[in-house]
Structure formats: structure tokens, C-alpha cells
Amino acid sequence: MGRNRWMAAMKLKFKINWRNMDHIFLLTLLALTAYGLVMVFSASAPSAFYIKEDSMYFFKNQALWSVVGFGVMFLFSAIDYKFLKKLILPIYVFGLILLLGVAVFGKTINGAKRWLDFGFSTIQPSEFVKITIVMACALLLAEVKTISVKKTLVHLVGCGLIILLPAIFLLFQPHFSAIIIICLTVGVMMLAAGIPFRIFSGIAALAVVLGGIFILLEPYRLQRVLSFIDPFADKTGSGWQAVQSLYAIGSGGFSGLGLGRSRQKFLYIPEPQNDFIFSIACEELGFLGALAVLLLFALLLYRAVRIAMRAPDRYSMLLTFGLISLTIVQVLLNLGVATSSIPPTGIPLPFFSAGGSSFVFQMMSMGMILNISSQRDSGELTHI
């Protein structure tokens, strides 16, 4: 009898509500992934042949991880978000354990110790930790509008502590860009939760000051800022990536050079299938290709905001805002680096940049949003 009851509970928790699920959101994910695979194939061919003597290497790897990613997405779209809500503490602690594992057993690549090597693949635990922080902060911020100002401040301090513990590990990797992404994402969640602007502006000012201090403490970070101001001043040195990226974007014109005809991907831009894949898309597909990328992400954002507005409760509303902000913040920062609008930093373009584990974690968060969409209320703006 007990076993039957357990099985019944499991069926309830692992059920995909296809009828209520946001199908446009799902189709947008499919379109972004397909577009990304095409660009990974085109952008990575020269590098893959040079490194692995197989021009299809990165494409085949990304295609395999795409299948895994969609499997994970459907799994998390079937798990009731309220069930995961009960497990936030152990999930958060597990993320800290992974970061500790990186500190002890991590693999160093390009001077940064951010990866765990499992033999068949390497994973970047910071991608998972970003999600756990969003989940934990959503739980605290969900209480903001129903408690006193004093307790609101206590909850905001709680959010700060949730960020602080992983940030300490990330600083020693070093992975400053991940800290920036987390802070910006939680900032968006605070606005969505209705934090008074005077409090929010104070927190934002403090974050900017701390960020400036950390930049000054590390010479390489300061050098990135200086090269951003005028990348052409040292175009064969610190400004190389930015300059080559601008050459690629400028060469594309309105309709591009044609798919597969990029010149900058021939070892001018380092790892063109990763941080600068948008530049290759602009070079090969021009303004039209870039516009397609922006419109797809805009549609994804619109549908996610729509899901958040119809979410069953404040927690799921804030969780949706947090998860989609986590994606869009990375998109904006990646495009900023590619167009030399912000100082260079290693931030991949979601759904496009080659990277198996990061794609899987991305799809995990998308699965959570789909689960919330399948449990939406009939009305809108009921929890803002």
C-alpha cells in the first residue's frame, strides 16, 4: 500500500502538462538551439581541424549535448516546481560542495581553475550554482511584500549572504564574470519583487564600488578595462580579440559574406565557437543574421515575462524572472563584449556558444520555466 502511494506521488511530480505548457516558448528554444548548432558548425570548423584534426568535432559534441539538454529540460518541465522549492537548502549546499570540489580537484584551463574533469567531459559548477542562487533568493524575496520594512531588509541581507558564500569560491577560481552575472540577475529579481528604489539604488551603488575595488586589485582586470577604452591602441596585444571581433561584425554588412565564408574564424578570433560566435554570425549572415538572434531572444524574454505574470504564486513569479534574467543578462554581456561596448570577459552566448554542460544547465532552468507555465493562472498581473 505504501509503495503504491509513493508511486502515485512520483507520477504526480513527474507529469508534463502539454496542454497548458507555453508552446511558443518551447518552439523558441528549439529555434535558438537549431540556429546555435548551425553557427557552431560553421564557426568551429577551422579551429576543430587545427586542434582535433576533425572539422566536425565541436559540432558533433554540441549536437550530442543538445540531445541531453533537451532531455534534462523535459525532465525539469515534468517536476513540480513546488517539489524543488522544498529542496532548496540541500540543492544550494550541493552547489557549494561542487565549488569546494573545484577548489580541491578542479582542472585549470587558460589560467583559471573553474572546471571539474569527469573524463568523458568537464563541467563548470558555477553554471549550476547560478541556478541555485536564483532559487534561494526567489524564496526570500517572495516574502518582501507581505512583511515589514525591517524584515524586508533582513531578507535582503539574507540574499546578500546567499550570494557571498559562492562568490568567495568564485573569486579564487577566478571567475569574476560569474559574480557579475549573479549580482545583476538578483538585482532584476529585487526590482520584480517590489524593493523600494531608494533601497535598491543603495545596494546597486555598493555593488558598483565593490566591483571597482576588485577590478583594481587584479592587474589583468584593469588591463581589460584599459584595452576596452581604446582596443586599437594595442591591437596586436590586449586589444586583439575586440579588434578582430569588430572586423568580423563590420565585414558582414547587411546580408553577410555567406554561411561558412567567415575569414576571422580562421584562427584570428580565439575560439570563435565560444565567446565570439555572435561576431562570426554577423560576418557570415550580416545584419539580418544578427537581427534574427536578437528577435529570438526578445521573443524568449517576452514569453517568459508572460509566464511570470501568470504564475501561480509570488515564488514561481520571481523564480521565472530570475531564470530568464540569468539568460538575458548573459546575452547582453556577451553581445557587449562582441561589439566592444563593455570590457572583454569570458561570457558565452546562451544556446549558441559551444559548451556541453553549460547548455545542459541552461536547459534545466528553461525546463523549470516550462513547468511553471503549465501551472499558470488564468489571470495576469496577480502577484506583482
Image: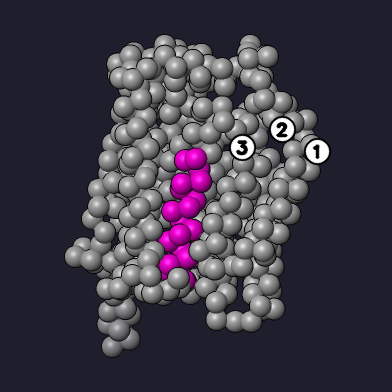
Q: Nearer the viewer, mark 3 or mark 2?
A: 2
Q: Which mark is residue 217?
A: 1
In the rendered structure, which disc, 1 or 3, sits on the residue that comes first in sequence? 3
Residue corresponding to mark 3 = 107
Is 56 located above or below residue 141 in the figure? above
Identify the coloring. one colour
Residue reaching furthest bottom? Answer: 1
Identify the image quadrant of residue 212: top right
Residue at horizontal 72 percent and vertical 32 percent from the top: 221
Q: Quadrant of residue 116?
A: top right
Q: Which mark is residue 221?
A: 2
Apparent side of residue 259 relative to residue 270 in the rendered image (left or right)? left
Circle 1: element type? helix
Mark 1 vs mark 3: in front: 1
Q: Nearer the viewer, residue 345 or 336?
A: 336
Q: Along the line of sight, which residue is nearer the eye, 300 or 102?
A: 300
Q: Are marks 2 and 1 in contact (CB under 8 Å)?
A: yes
- Left or right: residue 336 versus residue 34 is right
Crowd band around label 2 with a 10 angstrom C-alpha radius: few (<14), some (14–19), many (20+): some
Determine the secondary structure under disc 3: strand
Could you give the CA–CA distance between mark 2 and mark 1, rounded to whole angstroms?
A: 8 Å
Considering the whole magenta stretch, tell me its main secondary structure: helix
Q: In terms of sequence position, does the residue under pointer 3 or pointer 2 come before the other? A: 3
Task: Inspect this view and state whether residue 155 appears.
Answer: yes
Q: Look at the picture and state if 48 lies above or below 305.
A: above
Q: Residue at x 55, y 81 (%)?
A: 146
First to last magenta residue range:
315-332
Residue 283 against residue 143 in the figure, above or below: above
